[in-house]
């Protein structure tokens, strides 16, 4: 089986909604599953999608913001309790500290209790945490994963997944970025941050004055996503990372003003195949 696909466990923002959980995706490469980011709601969406969390033995993090990592401990604890016996984590500098502070320290007594009941330590006490630099960060069983730095408020990477002659690129959180254009060149699918799509929060949120101006430096408009797809020569663009009450049809039209390929609005539990 040579299928390469992406299933969205979360297509929302730091303020999730019933319809959109925090950021998360499952990459399927043949028979293997890989989790890309692990924001709040990821574990529940995996259950809703019918995805066996114990079959996920690799977790990739684009960056360490809360909406990409809040379910880190839940995913690891639950999948281990269900029987997962192996896990490798790949993330930027600081991932080791996150692993200790979100999981190993606060849940130490919980983990020790489960071990005392006879649960094998495999898959919990031997988790391999890899802090990567840009370049090829994974190359195994026909899947190659390449990371490049993009433009965000903290160190963030986009990732390209190449398998069986197909490729999916995820932008991470970013505004327009030449590094991303180069990474996505010739890919089959580009998944792109479109956080700056028209949304009610930009007009009516008194708790966050000037939100547009602040986010604009670190997230993309649909037009920028379309421009990136066009310049990279990809046939299919998927928009994601939406704020609450985003006008997704307006987002589609704006992306189409820059890109004449297929534009898809990502929804939680949607699967896109190369």
Image (tube, rainbow, N blue to C red):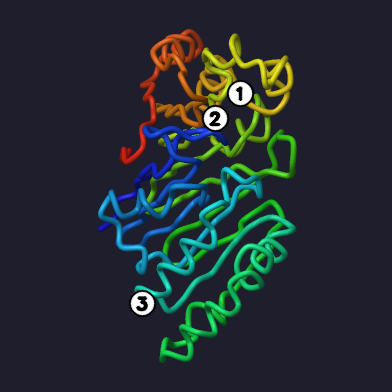
Asked which quadrant contains residue 101, the reply is bottom right
Tell me if mark 3 has few (under 14), some (14-19) or many (20+) residues whose alpha carbon lies within 10 angstroms of its own: some
**Comes first in the chain, label 3 or label 2:** 3
Is the Cβ of the residue at disc 3 closer than 8 Å to that at disc 2?
Answer: no
Query: Is the C-beta separation of discs 3 and 1 under 8 Å?
Result: no
In the image, residue 23 above or below residue 82:
above
Image quarter hosting the C terminus: top left
Checking the image for residue 83, the label placed there is 3
Instruction: Give x and y (percent) for residue 209.
Output: 71, 16
In 3D space, how far apart are the residues under numbered discs 2 and 1 (Cα atoms)?
Answer: 6 Å
Where residue 160 appears, as percent x and y from the top left, is 53, 46
The label number, if any, that marks residue 182 in the structure image: none
The disc, 2 or 1, on the residue closer to the chain's N-terminal end is: 2
- Point 36% across, 37% down: residue: 268
Which quarter shows the N terminus?
A: bottom left
Tell me the element at label 2. strand
Mark 2 surroundings within 10 Å by alpha-carbon count, few (fewer than 14), some (14 through 19), many (20 or more): many
Kindly identify which numbered label has been placed on residue 220: 1
Q: Tell me, for residue 193, which label it has, or none.
A: 2
């Amino acid at each position: 089986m040579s299928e390469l696909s992406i299933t969205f466990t979360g297509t929302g923002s730091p303020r999730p909604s019933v319809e959109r959980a925090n950021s998360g995706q499952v990459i399927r490469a043949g028979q293997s599953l890989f989790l890309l980011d692990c924001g709040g709601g990821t574990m529940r969406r995996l259950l809703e999608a019918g995805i066996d969390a114990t079959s996920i033995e690799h977790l990739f993090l684009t960056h360490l913001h809360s909406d990409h990592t809040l379910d880190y401990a839940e995913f690891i604890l639950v999948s281990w309790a269900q029987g997962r016996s192996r896990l490798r984590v790949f993330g930027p500098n600081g991932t080791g500290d996150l692993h200790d502070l979100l999981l190993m320290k606060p849940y130490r007594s919980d983990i020790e209790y489960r071990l005392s009941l006879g649960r094998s330590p495999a898959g919990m006490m031997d988790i391999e945490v890899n802090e990567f630099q840009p370049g090829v960060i994974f190359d195994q069983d026909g899947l190659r994963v390449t990371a490049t730095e993009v433009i965000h408020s903290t160190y963030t990477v986009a990732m390209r997944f190449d398998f069986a002659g197909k490729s999916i690129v995820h932008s991470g959180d970013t505004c327009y970025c030449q590094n991303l254009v180069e990474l996505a060149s010739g890919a089959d699918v580009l998944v792109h941050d479109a956080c700056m799509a028209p949304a009610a929060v930009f007009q009516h949120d008194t708790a966050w004055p000037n939100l547009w101006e602040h986010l604009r430096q670190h997230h993309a408009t649909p037009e920028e996503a379309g421009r990136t797809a066009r310049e990279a020569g990809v046939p299919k663009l998927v928009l994601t990372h939406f704020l609450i009450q985003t006008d997704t049809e307006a987002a589609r039209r704006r992306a189409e003003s820059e890109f004449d390929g297929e534009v898809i609005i990502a929804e939680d539990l949607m699967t896109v195949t190369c």
